Image (cartoon, grey):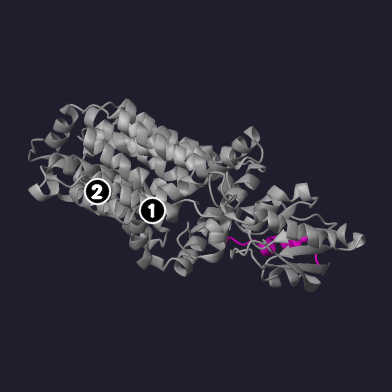
Amino acid sequence: MKVQGDRKTDCEETSRREVPVFARGPVVALAAATGVLLLLVSGRYGYFGDELYFLAAGKHLAWGYADQPPVLPVLAWLMDSIAPGSLTVFRIPAVLATAAGVVFTGLIAREIGGARRAQVLAAGAFAICGQFLGTGHYLATSTVDPVLWTALLWLLVRWMRTRDDNLLVWIGVVTAVTLNVKFLIGGFWLVAGACALVFGPRELLRRPKLWIGVAIAVVACVPTLLWQAANGWPQLGMGEAISKEVSGDLGGRLGFVPGALAGAGYVIGALGLLFGLTCLLFRSELRPYRFLGWTTVGLTIVFIIANGRFYYISGMFPICWAAAAVFIEARRPALWWRWVPTWPVYVLSFLFALPHALPLWPVGWVAEHKAPHPAYAAEEIGWPKLADSVADAHRALPPEVRDRTTIVTTGYWQAGALSRYGPERGLPEAFSASRGFWYFGQPADTAENVLFVGYEPQRLASHFSDARIVARIDNHLGVLNSSQNMPIWLVSGRTEPWSEIWPQLRDLKA
């Protein structure tokens, strides 16, 4: 590509460049292989705690929730309606989203000038990324959100090549959907808009159809914003709660960049990410896309300042991998490197990521070893046994006490598990004051006693006359997770009405 001095000429040459042929065969094969792998392991272990929450939220469909927009609960409701209780069917959207991310990454490489090899290298980086394989195993916002970012980046770089302004309307549609999964994409557009003003293409911001796309995205957000306004903007409190969790669990701000690099992949992913970002920032061949490199830098800084989770930046991985792949393809390798095939490095990276990303090990291995296994593997195990433990404690109560006893849990995971497995065990509806579960309802005024599932009942017990442990959770598998050995309390003698107790218990912490 011939590089001219001013940015306008750079953009014009980008729009005139002929796009390489899409390497449909190998890229689609990579996507299909990724999907098949995820599908094969989708039924292993059990629901992740967040998935149980989404199932419960799907029973209380609304335009918004305390901790997220509505798309994930709707997906959970839809998949569970199609095949009630099927974990494999429940996770099909996650499988399809991850496979689509592989294809979109290859398409990004194509749009910025990459031929067959570059497209396969970029798509392969997505396919073997431990972060995306791991989240592709379960249905969560962190699964769907980065793939939607990838689709948006593809549309954006395609617009830069074709100048087809209809693409800007579709960018607005994708942004609208993304905003209803997670609000993070709003941060992308603020940073990307500023970087486009500084580095170009400034004309992007002058296109009328871009603002039509903005209007579409804004209108799509109105229902969930109205819900937030009507409920006191709990999403703002979620930011503070997550910041505290990150400080306690992941090393805070110092752990953001190492966590993101580890999530990208220890060999291909991390090196490709750093090299691709360097290419976007400093290589003249990729100058038209420089603003996306600075957007990646800017978003990283914003998320670090906000003390966000390291995977918030993962939606920018594909453009960096694509840039690295295009640069590598365009360079004639040194003689010593010419004889080293690329695929063994990808295979080794994949084999290293696999046991850390997917539930390949028997449950016994998870019980006996801290690693290697997925970080949240233990939190997919033992939920039916948790319901069994609570059901046993509930049945052991005298009938006259049991009839006036409700169930409250300390966390939304435990409440989600009882919502899923409790009815078939004869348990009454479970309640929790944790995060979005608080909004799903409160115990009835006839409930004078509580079976409380949690470690610390003090906040609840202060409104009752007595609290004592009557049982403990046991998954009978030896797996140490957040619920194992959790006490079950009988809290009795309510001293205040639930209408006064419940508002005091609301807690946005996990």
Q: Is residue 283 above or below residue 445?
A: above
* Dot 2 crowding, Cα within 10 Å, few <14, some 14–19, many 20+: many
The quarter of the picture where residue 393 lies is: bottom right
Inspect the magenta stretch and tell me whether residue 496 lies in it.
yes
Q: Please provide the residue range marked out in magenta.
A: 495-509
Q: CA distance from mark 1 to mark 2?
A: 26 Å
Instruction: Specify whether 302 is left or right of 469.
Output: left
Instruction: Specify whether 442 is left or right of 318.
Output: right
Q: Residue at x 54, y 41 (%)?
A: 91
Q: Residue at x 43, y 65 (%)?
A: 250
Report the disc number at residue 293.
2
Q: Position of residue 375 (x, y in %)?
A: 48, 59
Question: To which residue does mark 1 refer?
Answer: 353
What residue type is disc 1 on?
Ala
Q: Residue at x 76, y 48 (%)?
A: 423
What residue type is disc 2 on?
Gly
The residue nearer to you, when weighing 77 against 337, is 337
Q: Secondary structure at mark 1?
A: helix
Q: Is residue 322 above or below residue 433?
A: above
Q: Position of residue 465 (x, y in %)?
A: 82, 73
Q: Residue furthest right?
A: 400
